[in-house]
Amino acid sequence: GNLRESRVGAKRSDIIVVTKCPSNLTAIQRETIKSKLQRYNKEVFFTTISYADKISGDKEISIDSLKDFEVLLITGIANPAPLLNFLSTQNVKFTHLEYGDHHHFSSKEIEDIQQIFTSLKSDKKLILTTEKDYTRLKSRIEQLFYLEIETKFLENKNVFDTLIKSHI
């Protein structure tokens, strides 16, 4: 993706992985993208993000049960839109606090987060974040949970695996 590597980096690569594609990217759309990348003469793969069916923290809670909670969502990622869309499709009621990518949370921000969380009216409430932000916040915030993501290939994962193994 453009957030990780510019197109110039394709020249020194062995393969190209187009990340964070919609899961319903059609064969025609994939061919259009491949045609734009053909000048690099590399094998092209497409991946998407898949969310876990549970959130983790002190305990695990199924995504289906998450709709019974009032959720304070904290993100410090470049593009939270896919996560927001996912939670919305799961009928999760959440309040979103958005911070910049790779954000380092100050003590004041932690206090503000805890104050907002305390002000939520529900008896069933929790704080949800990304796995990346969880590692930054777990020692500073209680009742903190994270949602795992997984990268899935849209096609040709076996070919990708074979290529990777040939370089080991």
Image: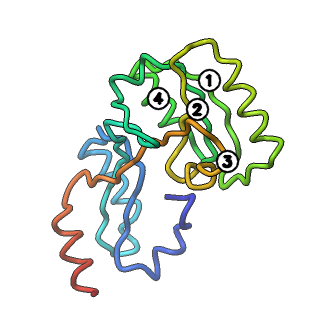
Distance of label 2 from label 3 (alpha carbons) = 15 Å
**Where residue 53 sits: x, y (%)?**
31, 36
Distance of label 1 from label 4 (alpha carbons) = 13 Å
On the image, numbered disc 4 is attached to which residue? 85
Q: Is residue 36 left or right of residue 100?
A: left
Determine the image quadrant of residue 18. bottom left
The nearer-to-camera label among 1 and 4 is: 1
Residue sitting nearer the eye, 74 or 156: 74
The residue sitting at 80% across, 49% down in the picture is 106
Q: For numbered disc 4, what is the local secondary structure?
A: helix
Q: For numbered disc 2, what is the local secondary structure?
A: strand
**Where residue 148 sits: x, y (%)?**
41, 46
On the image, numbered disc 1 is attached to which residue? 95
Q: Amino acid at mark 3?
A: Arg
On the image, numbered disc 2 is attached to which residue? 73
The nearer-to-camera label among 4 and 3 is: 3
- Mark positioned earlier in the residue sequence (1 or 4): 4
Residue 140, label in figure: 3
The residue sitting at 21% across, 71% down in the picture is 161
Determine the image quadrant of residue 59. top left
Q: Is residue 24 left or right of residue 133?
A: left
